[in-house]
Each structure stands twice: as C-alpha cells, then as structure tokens.
Amino acid sequence: NAQIKEGVHDLLKNRDGLICGICNGFQALIKLGLLPYGKIMDTDENCPTLTFNDIARHQSKIVRTRIASNMSPWLSLTNVGDVYNVPISHGEGKFLASDKVIADLIKGGQIATQYVDMNGEATYDIDYNPNGSALAIEGITSPDGRVFGKMGHSERVGAGLYRNVIGDYDIKMFKSMVQYFKK
C-alpha cells in the first residue's frame, strides 16, 4: 500500500521515529526490507529471510542472548557483551543470509543480538540456538539502528515471571525507547 509505505518512510526519515518487530513482527520487517535496509522495498532471493527451524517444528523455551551491538536506540541502556535470558516461541525463526549480507551486517554493527551458550559464546548448538540461525543471529537493526527486529519475546518481562530460570530478562529496550524520545 503506497500510503502505508509513505507513512512509514515519513516516520523514519522526517519524524525520527522508531520501529520494533518481535517474532512475527521481525519476520514482517525482514519481508518488507525494513530490515536490514531501513526502507520498504521489493525483496528478492539475495535478501535475508527467516525460515523454518532446523528441527522443522515449533520451539518454546527460554534461551540466552548476548548484546553484539548497542548502536540502536532500542539498546542504548545495554552494553556489548551483556547476556539476557529471553523466552522464545516460534517455528520459523532461522535467520538466513548470504555471506556478503552477513559481512555487511557485521561491518555496519547491525547484528544486535546473538544466541549464546552458558559461556556467553555464539553457537550453532541447538540447545542454545533454537532455530539454527546463521552466526547465531537473534536480532538485527537497520543501518541507523532505529528499526530493530528480534525473535525472542523481550516484551514478556514483569515481576514474578520466570522464577525457575535464573537470569536477567530485562533488555531495557522500552526504557531505552522512552529515553530516546525524551532527549
């Protein structure tokens, strides 16, 4: 829809807005080209995608993710290397991209979060990378960081949740967003 496309581009280019997509929202941002390119565009086979998990079924559990880049306003209250627990629930969360696209994401600091093992190391081990994502990518940003997408449900935080699994669950993305608009 041309009006929606125009409105989204106005939000990002003229109004200094932010966009976040979690799980299915991340998939939508990828399909639109907003991730990793920062604009709505026709995507093709050269663009990244999210596809079926390696085990070809739904995964629902708590995983660990590490902040790989905090250049996004959504992650401004985190530090590179911080590890957070996050609940996941998806059947199509495997991030795939060509070596060139992944190299560009690395160069641009656009790989925001990665699945990590108990030592905080990015891994392909299915016990920690529940979908087999390339380079253990869990979340990415647009080049300017204002569009952020991730598979894990970081919005599912609150007092009394996850008492049986010790860890830090608050990635502070919503506090970071509020701070961004108060500047």
Image (tube, helix red, strand yellow):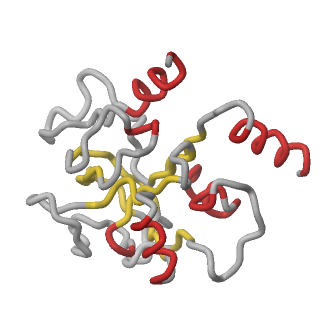
Residue placed most toward the observer, 39 or 126: 39
Residue at 40% from the left image edge and 33% from the top image edge:
173
Q: Residue at x 57, y 61 (%)?
A: 36
The tally of labels here is 0
User: Taking 147 as reference, is 179 above or below it?
Assistant: above
x 32%, y 68%: residue: 136
Kindly indicate the quadrant of the structure image that contains residue 75. top left
Q: Given the current orientation, which residue lies at the most extreme right position?
A: 2
- Outermost residue on the left side: it is 119
Q: Say if 103 sits above or below 144 in the image.
A: below
**Closest to the observer, 108 or 51:** 108
Percent x, y of residue 132: 35, 74
In the rendered image, residue 77, in percent from the top left (x then y), is placed at: 32, 32
In the displayed structure, does residue 110 sit left or right of residue 21? left
> Could you say which is closer to the camera, residue 174 or residue 107?
107
Q: Position of residue 140 (x, y in %)?
A: 46, 57
- Whether residue 127 sits left or right of residue 72 in the image: it is left
Residue furthest toward the top? 182
How far across and down, in percent of the image, does residue 88 sit? 37, 52
69 vs 28, nearest the viewer? 69
Location of residue 120 by image quarter: bottom left
Q: Is residue 145 above or below residue 163?
A: below
Q: Say which residue appears at 10% left-offset and 58% top-offset.
A: 118
